[in-house]
């Protein structure tokens, strides 16, 4: 076709399109050489460097992320461990508190029981003392009443005569002996050994009111010293 | 514009359609000089070649002027273009070792693309590759490169022996195979490389010129033929797009074949 075109042409001598002139080859070579030189020496290396930097940045990012993840995992393990420790400790504290509560309740119960026992004891003691006091008062009054009654019956004073006085005293001593046997038999709470002490104490403590009630117009002075020993 | 320039070869007294001739590719030199016995002609095609080369060079230089990890538009375009050859051709055809040749392959590819595309750029409308000189230069460089790589990687003896006596062939067949292999590798490879590119650009340019001139002729002829002018015009437009495809495809083919030859030269034993 090229040859045909060449033959058909009107100008006669046509240049051949398939035979390159040396000048064109040299010019083309120079153009390509300049382009290839600049691209290969300057452009592509910079692009490769950019690719490298980009890859480094991405890999570095991945590495950093992995490190962060590792750290987070470690933290989680630590945290869980601490949580477990805290739970154990809390359970221990709870157990201790429960035991302590139990102990306090026990203690309070013991104290309360002791207190109540003490109160009951004191009540019983008071009852005993009051009973003895009552007994003593009654005994004194009985003596007085008996004497008065006897005076009325006999019609004269017995107090003036020392012999009669002794009779009365003896009678009273007998009554005393009775009185001492009565608390031992009748007294509810205290032991037999404690009763005389209690009785004695009761007599001293209750002496004055008893005396006050018992003070007689006639012979309050005569009886009191006798009963003291 | 180019149509009138190109139609200038027709004698004024010829009433018929003047088809474009090979003179299309030999425009009047802008300047001529002789240096060391070699005649140089600077024509508009030479200038077009320089402009194309300068443009593609400027694009790439600007794209890497301030490289950043996160590329801007221009940098991204430059990198994508280079990566296309680097990863899509060099690594794909040759393998990991191919990255060594990626710079050369990319230079070849973009030189060809820039010069080819001038064939449809308005006011240029002729590809410098439509003249045999430029494809011959590229094919020559490729020829020297792949032979040099073959000799360097395999040694002179094994390389040429591998070409002449490809392994895995019955001994008797070497009578046929050896001349064909030698001719195909050492003679036809550079010729076919150069001629394929040149002929595609040459024919493409003629095609475009014929439809352009045909449109003008049909409009001017003064009879019912005028109704065919739009057909010719539409064909010229369609062919322009087709030419763009061919131009890029031929650049790709040239580069892939260069990579294939390099890969063959790199192989240890054939």
Image (cartoon, coloured by chain):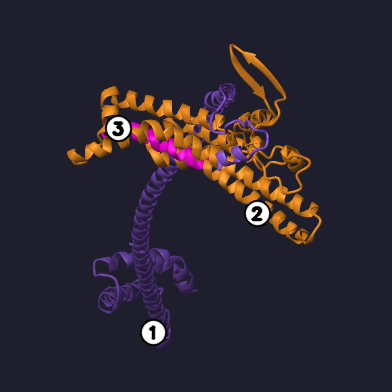
Chain colours: A purple, B orange
The chain holding disc 1 is A
Left or right: B41 as drawn, with respect to A183: right
Q: Is residue A174 magenta?
A: no
Viewer-proximal residue, A57 or A41? A41
Give the structural element (helix, strand or loop) at label 2. Answer: helix
The Cα–Cα distance between marks 2 and 1, rounded to whole angstroms, is: 169 Å
Residue A22 place in picture, x, y as percent: 56, 22
Which residue is most to the top? B36
Q: Is residue B69 visible?
A: no
Residue range in magenta is B251-270
Q: State the residue position of label 3.
A: B163
Location of residue A115 by image quarter = bottom left
Q: Earlier in the sequence, mark 2 or mark 3?
A: 3
Q: State the residue position of label 1.
A: A150
Viewer-proximal residue, B64 or A134? B64
The circle on residue B238 is: 2
């Amino acid at each position: 076709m090229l040859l045909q075109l060449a033959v058909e042409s009107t100008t006669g001598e046509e240049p051949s399109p398939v035979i390159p002139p040396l000048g064109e080859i040299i010019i083309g070579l120079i153009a390509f050489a300049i382009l290839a030189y600049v691209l290969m020496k300057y452009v592509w290396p910079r692009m490769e460097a950019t690719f490298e930097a980009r890859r480094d940045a991405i890999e570095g990012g991945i590495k950093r992320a992995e490190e962060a993840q590792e750290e987070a995992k470690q933290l989680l393990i630590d945290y869980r461990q601490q949580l477990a420790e805290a739970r154990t400790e809390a359970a221990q504290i709870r157990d201790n508190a429960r035991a302590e509560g139990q102990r306090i309740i026990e203690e309070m119960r013991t104290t309360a029981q002791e207190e109540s026992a003490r109160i009951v004891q004191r009540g019983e003691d008071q009852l005993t003392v009051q009973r003895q006091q009552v007994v003593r008062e009654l005994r004194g009054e009985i003596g007085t009443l008996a004497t008065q009654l006897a005076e009325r019956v006999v019609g004269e004073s017995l107090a003036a005569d020392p012999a009669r006085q002794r009779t009365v005293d003896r009678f009273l001593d007998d009554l005393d002996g009775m009185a001492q046997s009565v608390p031992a038999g009748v007294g509810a709470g205290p032991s037999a050994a404690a009763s005389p002490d209690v009785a004695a104490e009761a007599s001293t403590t209750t002496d004055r009111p008893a005396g006050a009630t018992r003070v007689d117009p006639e012979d309050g002075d005569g009886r009191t010293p006798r009963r003291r020993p | 514009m180019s149509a009138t320039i190109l139609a200038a070869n027709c004698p004024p007294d010829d009433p018929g359609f003047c088809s474009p001739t090979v003179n299309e590719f030999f425009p009047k030199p802008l300047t001529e000089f002789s240096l060391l016995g070699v005649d140089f002609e600077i024509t508009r095609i030479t200038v077009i070649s320089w402009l194309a080369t300068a443009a593609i060079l400027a694009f790439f230089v600007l794209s890497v002027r301030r490289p950043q990890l996160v590329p801007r538009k221009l940098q991204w375009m430059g990198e994508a273009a280079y990566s296309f050859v680097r990863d899509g051709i060099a690594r794909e055809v040759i393998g990991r070792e191919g990255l060594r040749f990626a710079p050369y392959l990319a230079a070849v590819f973009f030189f060809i693309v820039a010069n080819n595309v001038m064939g449809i750029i308005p006011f240029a409308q002729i590809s410098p590759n439509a003249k045999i000189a430029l494809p011959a230069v590229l094919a020559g460089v490729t020829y020297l490169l792949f032979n040099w790589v073959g000799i360097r990687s395999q040694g002179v003896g094994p390389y040429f022996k591998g070409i002449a006596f490809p392994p895995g062939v019955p001994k008797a067949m070497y009578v046929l195979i050896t001349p064909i292999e030698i001719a195909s590798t050492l003679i036809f490879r550079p010729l076919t490389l150069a001629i394929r590119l040149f002929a595609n650009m040459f024919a493409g340019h003629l095609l475009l010129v014929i439809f352009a001139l045909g449109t003008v002729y049909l409009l001017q002829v003064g009879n019912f033929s005028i109704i065919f002018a739009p057909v010719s015009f539409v064909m010229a437009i369609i062919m322009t797009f087709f030419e763009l495809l061919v131009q890029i495809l031929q650049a790709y083919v040239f580069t892939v074949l260069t990579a294939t030859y390099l890969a063959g030269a790199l192989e240890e034993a054939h």
